[in-house]
Image (tube, rainbow, N blue to C red):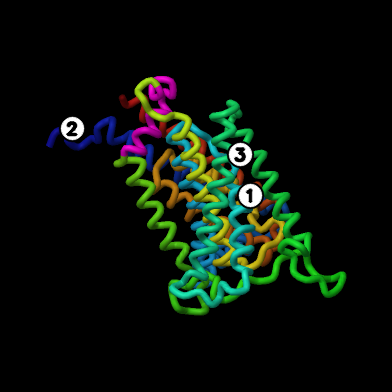
Amino acid sequence: MTTTTIMLSLPDRRRMVGVAVPFIAVAGSLAIGLLLVAASGKSVPEAIEAFLDGAFGTAYAIGASINRAVALALVGLGFILAFRANLTNVGGEGQIAVGGIVATAIGLWTPISDLPLGLAVVLPLLGGTLAGALWGGIAGVMKVRFGTNEVISTLLLGFIALLLVYWCVQSTTLLRQPQTSSATLPESLPIADAVKLPGLTGSPESPLHIGLVICLLLAGVTAVVLQRSTFGLRLRAIGLNELAARRAGMPGGILLVVALALAGAFGGLAGAIMLQGEQYYLKAGFSSGYGFDGLVVGLLSRGSTVGVLAGALFFGFLRSGGISMEIMAGVPAALTLVIQGLIVIAVAGSVILVERLERGGR
């Protein structure tokens, strides 16, 4: 057997390095995180045990982690859809917020519990989706009509949406629960049981709900749209060269508005699913940074729906483990966020390195 048949070819070695680099980067950032935990005076073994218990320790923990991943994946899917048209949607947090507001309003509508055929569940989901689409579409119209950069408009619209949530839960004429005393919390009434998302496992020990099925179906649809449809091809053409695409007869302005509206729809659906599947009532800050984490998932996916799902799972379990470390091991919340930030930086850096290796192989 010759040396050339034994040795791996250069492209094969580059592919192996491309697979290994992200894992090495994550392992290195986790090691640094554990060093920070030790430096803070907390027990590293207790922190690791708390993390594993919070992420994987029980059926409840696994179900909760996957539910969190669903919201992150939906925001990430919306991001890559808009990014195909060279648009950067950073307003996931606001789109989640308006989706949650509308889903709550519909879910608290008194006759909704009596609706047949599962409409009590479907209507709030649709309402949240349409609210997110409207919020994303506003940014699209601003870009096409006034030339406003979508990064700025989606970000600022996100801040407006968060203030709308605060207003809704502070005003009894909107969504705040009736005040019976000064101790009444500024939040909405809980939604009816008929509005809550059905569980997938049939076990009360697991909170896993049908949001996972919805997410997987939409991921499949998104992959087909981006890779196999005329609409996806047009988005790519607009993203590569908007002027040339317009000269070829493509409705560039409409495509840009639709792309941002669809990205917003995914965020609004994520907000409705969070409200109906996990939280059950609206409160200030209910989006909990999912929009920004979903943005990171979309950025690191490199435009791949599979990458979005994998990244969302990773960050979903990471978020659950971090919460558990904070509660059970006393690791400060700020330190947990630092560890998450280190992992994001490491993964982002590994993506850039892999891209350079791939370019070097051509």
Residue 153 appears left or right of 164:
left
Label number found at residue 154: 3
Q: Closer to the camera: disc 3 or disc 1?
A: 3
Q: Foreground: 230 or 185?
A: 230
Label number found at residue 35: 1
Q: What kind of element bears circle 1?
A: helix
Across and down, in percent, residue 307 comes to: 41, 46
- The disc labelled 3 sits on which kind of residue? Thr
Mark 1 and mark 2: Cα distance apart in space: 43 Å
Residue lying at 48% horizontally and 72% vertically, measured from the top left: 198
* Image position of 177 with respect to 348: above or below: below
> Is label 1 in contact with label 2 (beta carbons under 8 Å)?
no
Q: Foreground: 234 or 116?
A: 116
- The disc labelled 1 sits on which kind of residue? Leu
Residue 83 appears left or right of 230:
right
Task: Note whether residue 223 is visible.
Answer: yes
- The disc labelled 2 sits on which kind of residue? Thr
Tell which residue pokes out farthest to the right in this image: 182
Q: In which quarter of the view is residue 101 placed?
A: bottom right
Quarter of the N terminus within the rendering? top left
Residue 9 magenta: no
Which residue is identified by label 2?
A: 3
